[in-house]
């Protein structure tokens, strides 16, 4: 029997699953800040204990495939870091990050055609902390933030936790629709604080912003004095030879977020970075001091040594090849097993396939059935600030082995087909 703690919306409950509604009596509820009331939990995190059970094939998290990272490499990187200088990794470090690690970041950014000095780089606790810090310095309750529709759930939760009013702009297979953005900007009564975008290998939609639209976006942003926050978490994880210029390489005013989580190293290191115009970086750096004093020095030293041992260009190539194979298997098996009325786009890189089901399939309700069949995904509604996306689901191919992808999609197809048949037979006999 599986116990899952999920919101009420998961009813009706299938027989083998026990759903425990999240009812916690909270005697402090009248003293919380309004900010705390706005906090929204990520269903991906809520489901973590279920999806990480060995019998479940999980397409839920954005967990990178860490098998190719050898334990012996971590051990020798740690030894190297401590042999070089035992004291620095064990102490508090400077708030902006360690010299050696920032040099790796600069080297990577050069490949993205972004030329920065070490002082322009702020090392953060993952790109997620950068999202929190950006929110902290820009968002007052009621401020407008523009995001793609759908958008990365961790970003939405960060913006919402500071009381942002999120206004969304549609995507298509070429990424953010610039015409829709223009219309949105015309309609808004108040100027948005910034636009948050994931141009490369989008989470969750899997799409990539075309070259043409990148230039159009920068032109529009300049004309409208709109600040862009570019989240490039999946950079270098492309499966084709196309080169997409980073928005930051087209306009120095862009705030750029990067991470070591997805390809360069592992999310266990919890390291990311932000590049921003000097004045903004100064504010972010002060906000960061209040949050954590500094990013963990030990983790930075180990990552720096690991990247000497396994330079990022080779690692990025190796990981892209692995993920491309996984994507291919997922697309092939979706084609083979899924009902004809399901739709998805072919990701050019990254981790995700975004699947659209017929309008009457509620993927949040369906999740309990999927877990009974020992397969998991993230319901689409999580990637919207409102009630949209109920008939979508995000499938991550990054973590499962090739065989598991095939088996998991087979199991999921059974669940989806039974939902569709149930609805159709119900309509017929009504
Ligand atoms: C688009 C995007 N941005 C940021 C993050 C957070 O990454 P990090 O591990 O660096 O905090 C993720 C993680 O899934 C992501 O998908």
Image (cartoon, rainbow, N blue to C red):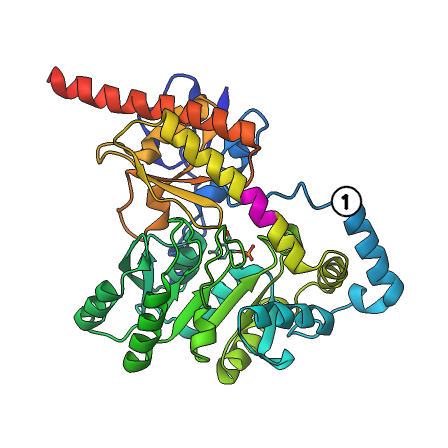
Q: Is residue 356 above or below residue 297?
A: above
User: Does the magenta portion include 41?
Assistant: no
Which residues, given as a range, are shown in magenta?
319-323
Q: Is residue 84 above or below residue 416?
A: below
Using the image as rendered, state which of residue 323 and residue 73 is in the foreground. 323
* Secondary structure that dominates the magenta span: helix
Graded by Cα atoms within 10 Å as few (under 14), some (14 to 19) or many (20 or more), the crowding at tag 1 reads few
Image label count? 1
Q: Which residue corresponds to the image point at 24% horizontal and 34% vertical from the top-left? A: 358
Q: Which residue corresponds to the image point at 50% horizontal and 77% vertical from the top-left? A: 276
Q: Position of residue 99 (x, y in %)?
A: 72, 74
Using the image as rendered, state which of residue 7 and residue 377 is in the foreground. 377
| Residue identifier under label 1 | 71
Q: Is residue 277 above or below residue 65?
A: below
Q: Position of residue 230 (x, y in %)?
A: 44, 67
Q: Position of residue 190 (x, y in %)?
A: 23, 74
Q: Residue furthest right?
A: 83
Left or right of residue 306: residue 164: left
Q: Position of residue 185 (x, y in %)?
A: 23, 71
Query: Is the C terminus in the top left, top right, bottom left or bottom right quadrant?
Result: top left
Query: Does residue 246 appear anywhere in the picture?
Result: yes
């Amino acid at each position: 029997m599986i116990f899952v703690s999920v919101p009420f919306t998961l009813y009706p409950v299938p027989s083998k699953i026990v759903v425990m509604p999240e009812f916690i009596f909270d005697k402090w509820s009248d003293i919380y800040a309004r900010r705390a009331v706005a906090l929204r939990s990520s269903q991906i995190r809520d489901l973590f204990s279920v999806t990480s059970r060995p019998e479940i094939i999980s397409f839920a998290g954005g967990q990178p495939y860490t098998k190719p990272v050898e334990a012996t490499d971590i051990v020798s990187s740690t030894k190297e870091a401590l042999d070089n200088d035992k004291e620095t990794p064990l102490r508090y470090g400077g708030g902006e990050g360690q010299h050696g690690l920032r040099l790796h970041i600069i080297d990577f950014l050069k490949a993205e055609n972004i030329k920065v000095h070490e002082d322009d780089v702020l090392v953060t606790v993952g790109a997620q902390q950068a999202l929190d810090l950006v929110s902290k310095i820009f968002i007052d309750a009621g401020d407008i933030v523009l995001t793609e529709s759908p958008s990365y759930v961790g970003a939405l939760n960060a913006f919402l936790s500071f009381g942002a009013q999120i206004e969304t702009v549609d995507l298509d297979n070429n990424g953010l629709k610039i015409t829709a953005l223009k219309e949105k900007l015309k309609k808004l009564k108040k100027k948005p604080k910034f636009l948050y975008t994931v141009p490369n290998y989008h989470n969750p939609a899997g799409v990539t912003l075309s070259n043409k639209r990148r230039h159009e976006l920068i032109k529009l942003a300049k004309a409208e004095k709109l600040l862009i926050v570019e989240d490039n978490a999946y950079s270098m994880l492309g499966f084709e030879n196309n080169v997409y210029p980073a928005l930051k390489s087209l306009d120095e005013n862009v705030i750029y977020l990067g991470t070591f989580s997805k390809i360069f190293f592992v999310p266990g290191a919890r390291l990311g970075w932000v590049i921003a115009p000097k004045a903004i970086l100064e504010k972010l750096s002060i906000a960061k001091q209040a949050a954590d004093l500094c990013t963990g020095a030990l983790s930075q030293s180990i990552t720096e040594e690991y990247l000497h041992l396994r330079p990022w260009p080779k690692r990025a190539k190796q990981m892209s090849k692995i993920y491309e194979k996984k994507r291919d298997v997922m697309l092939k098996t979706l084609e083979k097993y899924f009902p004809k009325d399901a739709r998805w786009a072919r990701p050019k890189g990254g981790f995700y396939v975004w699947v659209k089901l017929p309008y009457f399939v509620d993927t949040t309700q369906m999740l309990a059935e999927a877990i009974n069949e020992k397969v998991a995904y993230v319901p689409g509604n999580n990637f919207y600030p409102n009630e949209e996306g109920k008939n979508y689901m995000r499938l991550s191919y990054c973590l499962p082995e090739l065989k598991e992808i095939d088996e998991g999609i087979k199991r999921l197809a059974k669940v989806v087909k039974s939902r569709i048949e149930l609805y159709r037979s119900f309509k017929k006999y009504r």
